[in-house]
Image (cartoon, rainbow, N blue to C red):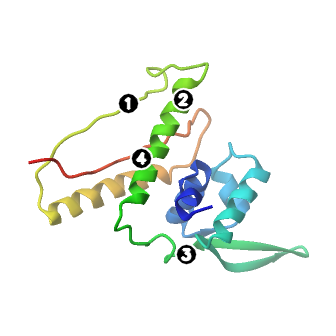
């Protein structure tokens, strides 16, 4: 499995997101936020991330004679340079695949499911763009760390930025 395949899986993206928000966590703590993911599946995805060094064991807790690993992100694994743009292309393919899977389903209700896509064009300096991105990140982080409640639905939001032709 190549690195892009490892991190582009939706469940593994959610595990990475958990660790981005909380810094570290056990599988039990991750499960408390990813309640819709079956426990065996969650362990499998955590193991894949660990095998590929995307996450690492930060510490080990001894609990009633068993060992419980506490995971954190491997900072080096997610800061890889992508001079070719292949990671972005793979991410876009993943978004397209998710939409194709949704529309191929039996219960397609875009309005009820609040499906949307929007775009805008901005003329910003690099510093203004960095500030814009920081503000977007802070808003997203606020809602990503929100505790699920009854009636919560898991949703994936993607933001793609590209230069425009002059």
Residue hosting label 1? 116
- Check disc 2: other Cα within 10 Å, few if <14, some if 14-19, many if 20+: some
Q: Position of residue 74 (x, y in %)?
A: 55, 75
Residue closest to the eye, 153 or 90: 90
Q: Is residue 37 left or right of residue 115?
A: right
Q: Residue at x 43, y 59 (%)?
A: 87
Label annotation for residue 92: 4
Q: Are marks 3 and 4 in contact (CB under 8 Å)?
A: no
Q: Is residue 116 above or below residue 86?
A: above
Q: Splitting the image into 4 quarters, where does residue 130 fall?
A: bottom left
Mark 1 → mark 2, Cα distance in angstroms: 13 Å
Which of the two labelled residues, at mark 2 and mark 4, occupies the earlier sequence position? Answer: 4
Pair 3/4: label in front: 4
Q: Earlier in the sequence, mark 3 or mark 2?
A: 3
Q: Earlier in the sequence, mark 1 or mark 3?
A: 3
Which of marks 4 and 1 precedes in the sequence? 4
Query: Looking at the rendering, in which quadrant would you find the N terminus?
Result: bottom right
Badge 3: residue crowd in 10 Å (few <14, some 14–19, many ≥20): some
The residue wearing badge 2 is 102
- Assign a secondary structure to mark 4: helix
| Viewer-nearest of discs 1 and 4 | 4
Instruction: State the separation of the CA atoms marked 2 and 4.
Output: 15 Å
Image mark for residue 74: 3
* SS state under label 3: loop
- Vertically, is 97 above or below 127? above
């Amino acid at each position: 499995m190549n690195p892009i395949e490892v991190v582009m899986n939706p469940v593994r993206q959610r595990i990475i997101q958990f660790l981005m928000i909380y810094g570290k966590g056990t599988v039990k703590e991750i499960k408390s936020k990813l309640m819709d993911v079956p426990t065996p599946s969650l362990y499998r995805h955590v193991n894949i991330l660990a095998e590929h060094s995307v996450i690492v064991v930060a510490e080990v807790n001894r609990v009633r004679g068993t060992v419980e690993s506490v995971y954190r992100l491997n900072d080096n694994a997610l800061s890889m340079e992508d001079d070719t743009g292949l990671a972005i292309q793979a991410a876009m393919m993943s978004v397209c695949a998710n939409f194709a899977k949704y529309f191929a389903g039996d219960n397609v209700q875009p309005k009820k499911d609040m499906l949307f896509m929007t775009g805008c064009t901005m003329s910003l300096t690099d510093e203004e763009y960095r500030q814009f991105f920081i503000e977007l990140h802070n808003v997203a982080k606020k809602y990503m760390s929100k505790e699920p409640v009854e009636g919560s639905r898991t949703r994936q939001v993607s933001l793609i930025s590209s230069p425009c032709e002059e």
